[in-house]
Amino acid sequence: MTSLDMPWTLQLVVAAFLLVGALVALIGSWGLAKLPDFYTRLHGPTKASTLGVGCTLIGSLLYFGHQQDGVSVQEALVTIFLFATAPVSAHMMGKAALRRRIKGVPGTRNPPER
Amino acid sequence: MTPNVRSRQFWLPHPLFSLFLALLWLLMVNDLSVAHALLGLALGVAIPIVTHAFWPEEAKIRRPLPLLRYLGVLLIDILRSNLVVALRILRPARELRPGFFTYPLALDDDFAITLLASTISLTPGTVSLHHDAEAKTLLIHALHLEDEAEAIAAIRTRYEQPLEEIFR
Amino acid sequence: MIAIVIPIAMTLFAVAALLNLYRLAVGPDIVDRILALDTLMINSIALIVLADLRMGLGVLFELALLIALMGFVGTVAMSKYLLRGDVIE
């Protein structure tokens, strides 16, 4: 890997994007493993993991944008795709959970009676 | 309902969608040449014509500029919501007060409702779970619900009213 | 600097994937497992991109796009199956 010819400010920005992305995604997965019931678990991956991977992809976009001539925009495409599909899959999984009558943790306010 | 072959309705049922498809093609091949731009435009015209019959009805984006502003607000809110959710995840679980609430919709356009539901799922501590088309409500789960009326009012002013402006 | 950060980020994502695997194994319901698989797919996209960065290839984005697509379609199909008992009505 030849990152020596990059200006150090750009290196710093790319490194920050990669690190922050990984940390945010880790927090999302930590929430998935730790939170008490399905509905609360749904929050971690839909928001945190998507943003984490988005940050990683933007870091990669900046890196390869400098490394190769011309801007490569395919990472942006993957990022947009992830942000567009994450709410849809969360909605579908939530509907499936409602249909299977999965109970929330005790203390959940206004549980749907169905 | 098949529009006349000579009309614009037939050849370009969704001009914005065609433009979007062409841009998407250019992004995918990652090559900004005239040949690919033409091929992208051809695809942008051909795909809506072929798939026109499957579409329920066309969504009408009245004003594209507020849509861009809306997307900007959305981007900031996604970052903010991630901070909020991350803090809630890192705190002990017994401090959480998860809860459901139903949100009465004022929008009636399908595409606008889809956008609103996606927005709700991407922003602070809420996930939309079920859309009741007859009662016109969304069932929403919140990671930390303190005041229902406040949550509903926040969604109304921050997201639904700009969407109404765009689609009406 | 980037050469140091990439292995750290990969480690963090690997830990995230292990946490997903834990949820996949424990469950308790099948919906939790679908959610765990979905998250695993998203994390694997990041791992692919990081591996691409580390090797300096810049060619693995088609793979990332494909996995994103497969993950989404798979999640929706499985949820749909649970909802209706059929993938396509």
Image: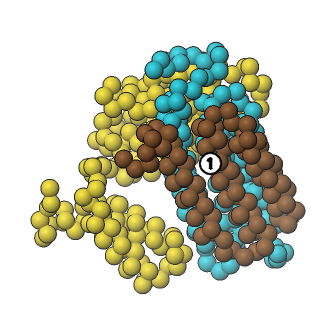
Chain colours: A cyan, B yellow, C brown
In the picture, measured across the screen, residue C85 lies left or right of residue B75, that is: left
- Residue C88: x %, y % from top left: 40, 50
Question: Is disc 1 placed on a helix, strand or loop?
Answer: helix
- Residue B41: x %, y % from top left: 36, 74
In the picture, measured across the screen, residue B87 lies left or right of residue B28, that is: right
The quadrant of the image that shows the C terminus of chain A is top left
- Residue C89: x %, y % from top left: 36, 47
**Residue identifier under label 1:** C38
- Can residue C36 be seen by looking at this rendering? yes
Res B138 quadrant in image: top left
- How many marks the image carries: the answer is 1
C47, above or below A38, in the image: below
Res C20 quadrant in image: top right
Residue at image coords 30%, 62%: B51
Taking depth in this image into account, of B16 and B118 the one nearest to the observer is B118
A52, above or below A94, in the image: below
Residue at image coords 69%, 74%: C58
Residue at image coords 76%, 66%: C51
Residue at image coords 65%, 54%: C41
Q: Which chain carries label 1?
A: C
Crowding at label 1, few (<14), some or many (≥20) Cα neighbours within 10 Å?
many
Taking depth in this image into account, of C20 and A88 the one nearest to the observer is C20
- Residue C31: x %, y % from top left: 59, 37
B34, above or below B22, in the image: below
